[in-house]
Image (spheres, rainbow, N blue to C red):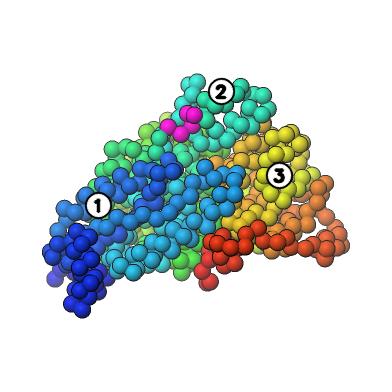
């Protein structure tokens, strides 16, 4: 007997006591024959003001056109918000970046649940889009697929490949007289040649890779470029798989398990992914009702080698994985064969991860993008959880080993990113300094803004090996250098970072996973007694509501109470 697949929408379409509802559906274009079809919400994070998102409406239309011809499905396109990290970086607008994740999840939940759609096909493009749609999908827990918008092609100038971080680092080079004003402008103009998410292993590509290994996208979704013919074909195929999920009643929480989350984390660590993965993974695990903590993260990171020579710490971009490796499934298959990933996890194809890889070719190591497990770039993970008197609840370090594993230096303290940026640009930072940027956490920021500008200025100025930076804010996936973020408790909540003074010595030990303020306990206690929390920077609007409800970075910065 054929299984009915319109289990949610039938509460409206098959209810004879809802004439107004039916009238509005007719007005929306439905015919009488459509009332028995399963309704699919095709939700994209489309908006024109950001290259990561500006093509998503076209992908959504491609998906809808394929659904229209199916006799059992009907699709409705939906859009939700987005915030461009690249455009808002270094401004007060960046305060909205992480909080936008919650708005995205809330808005998708609102439309899908209120309209009783039977399934979801989500099309995210930028950093917070991806965890935002994933959180909504897990809350709703009805058959769902994610189609990643894909990454941007590389830019080019003077024979060199460029990407978004090239433009940030160019300012540091210009200010240190390494390049001319004309060369600086040409780098900026040529860094982003069209639509798609930032091309390195930054947050968007990190999260897309994570989802593919976790089984929530079709194979190759993370590595197909944004405007490629393969991405268009993926959009055409996705209707067949949403139908499989509906018929078999396979839901997101059947796919997102502790093992599948570990698969996603291991792949992201192998590729040198963004530190933002930590916050998003913790949030996803919470909505999947899975107990996953920073301690779990640390345990896995110690066992997984870094094999991806990808930007920001490496050389290559996601387009190189597509063109020269053969796509993300080639890497996933290699890690399955090496016993790093578990192959028995269910995926949105209806098959297991191993079954999805049967026809995928084996990796060829005649390239410098992905290294063999036995000859890694680093024998363990580059993202480390550091504890100590500065971060008793944890902090996140991005340590590839290129800048060393240990740093001890003299603090230069700033109560805002703007102050720190001015100091770096005006050559007020010396070798051996530990830059401290505080009051930029989830509450203090508010919104935990990213610190790509200061890290890019440091790297562009040639100080990457000689200066460290610690913060209760976040880092962009494009950040690299000797950096530690997500310090909890944050300064606004009275964390020890709030009482650091210029000249204090700070020790970052990535071998023993510690972050230490080298100040006597008596002095620390005296400073704590005299510390007065600053007034909140925001007193109304969405950010005020966010800062009143958000959890700490060590708990995923979620606004629901768990």
Identify the residue position indicated by label 2 in the image.
183
Upstream in sequence: badge 1 or badge 3: 1
Q: Is 214 included in the stretch rendered in magenta?
A: no
**Residue at left 54%, top 32%?**
166
Magenta extent: 189-193
Mark closest to the chain's N terminus, 2 or 1: 1
Secondary structure under tag 1 reads helix
> Label 3, on which residue?
419
Q: CA–CA distance between discs 2 and 1?
A: 44 Å
> Which residue is label 1 attached to?
64
Q: Is residue 64 left or right of residue 371?
A: left
Q: Is residue 499 left or right of residue 306?
A: right
Q: Earlier in the sequence, mark 3 or mark 2?
A: 2
On screen, 62 above or below 319?
below
Q: CA distance from mark 3 to mark 2?
A: 27 Å
User: Hey, which quadrant is residue 521 in on the image?
Assistant: bottom right
């Amino acid at each position: 007997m054929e299984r009915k697949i319109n289990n949610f929408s039938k509460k409206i379409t098959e209810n004879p006591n809802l004439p107004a509802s039916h009238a509005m559906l007719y007005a929306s274009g439905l015919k009488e024959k459509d009332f028995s079809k399963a309704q699919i919400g095709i939700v994209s994070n489309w908006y024109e003001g950001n290259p990561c998102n500006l093509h998503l409406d076209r992908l959504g239309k491609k998906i809808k056109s394929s659904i229209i011809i199916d006799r059992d499905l009907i699709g409705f396109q939906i859009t939700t918000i987005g915030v461009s990290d690249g455009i808002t970086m270094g401004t007060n607008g960046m305060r909205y970046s992480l909080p936008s994740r919650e708005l995205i999840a809330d808005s998708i939940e609102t439309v899908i649940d209120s309209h009783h759609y039977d399934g979801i096909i989500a099309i995210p493009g930028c950093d917070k889009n991806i965890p935002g749609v994933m959180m909504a999908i897990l809350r709703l827990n009805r058959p769902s697929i994610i189609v990643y918008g894909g990454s941007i092609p590389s830019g080019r100038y003077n024979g060199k490949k460029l990407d978004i971080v090239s433009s940030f680092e160019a300012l540091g080079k210009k200010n240190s007289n390494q390049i001319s004003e004309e060369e600086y402008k040409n780098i900026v103009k040529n860094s982003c040649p069209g639509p798609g998410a930032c091309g390195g292993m930054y947050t968007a590509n990190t999260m897309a890779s994570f989802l593919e290994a976790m089984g929530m996208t079709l194979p190759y979704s993370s590595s197909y470029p944004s405007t490629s013919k393969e991405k268009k074909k993926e959009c055409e195929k996705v209707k067949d798989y949403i139908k499989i999920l509906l018929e078999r009643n396979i839901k997101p929480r059947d796919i997102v398990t502790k093992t599948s989350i570990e698969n996603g984390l291991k792949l992201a660590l192998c590729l040198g992914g963004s530190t933002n993965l930590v916050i998003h993974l913790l949030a996803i695990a919470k909505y999947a009702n899975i107990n996953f903590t920073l301690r779990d993260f640390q345990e896995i990171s110690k066992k997984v080698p870094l094999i991806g020579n990808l930007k920001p710490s490496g050389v290559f971009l996601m387009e190189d994985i597509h063109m020269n490796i053969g796509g993300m499934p080639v890497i996933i298959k290699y890690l399955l064969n090496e016993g790093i990933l578990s192959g028995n996890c269910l995926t949105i194809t209806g098959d297991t991860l191993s079954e999805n890889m049967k026809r995928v070719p084996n990796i060829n190591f005649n390239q410098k993008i992905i290294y063999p497990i036995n000859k890694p770039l680093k024998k363990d993970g580059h993202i480390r959880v550091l504890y100590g008197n500065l971060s008793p609840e944890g902090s996140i370090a991005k340590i590839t080993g290129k800048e060393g594993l240990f740093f001890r230096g003299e603090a230069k303290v700033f109560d805002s990113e703007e102050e720190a940026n001015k100091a770096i640009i005006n050559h007020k930072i010396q070798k051996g300094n530990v830059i401290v940027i505080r009051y930029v956490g989830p509450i203090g920021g508010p919104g935990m803004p990213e610190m790509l500008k200061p890290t890019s200025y440091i790297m562009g100025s040639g100080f990457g090996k000689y200066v460290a930076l610690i913060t209760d804010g976040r880092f962009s996936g494009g950040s690299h250098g000797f950096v530690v973020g997500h310090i909890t408790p944050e300064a606004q909540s009275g964390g020890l970072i709030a009482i650091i003074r210029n000249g204090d010595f700070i020790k970052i030990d990535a071998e023993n996973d510690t972050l230490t303020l080298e100040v006597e306990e008596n002095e620390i206690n005296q400073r704590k007694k005299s510390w007065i929390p600053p007034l909140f920077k925001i007193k109304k609007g969405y950010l005020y509501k966010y800062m009143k409800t958000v959890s700490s970075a060590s708990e995923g910065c979620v606004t629901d109470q768990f």
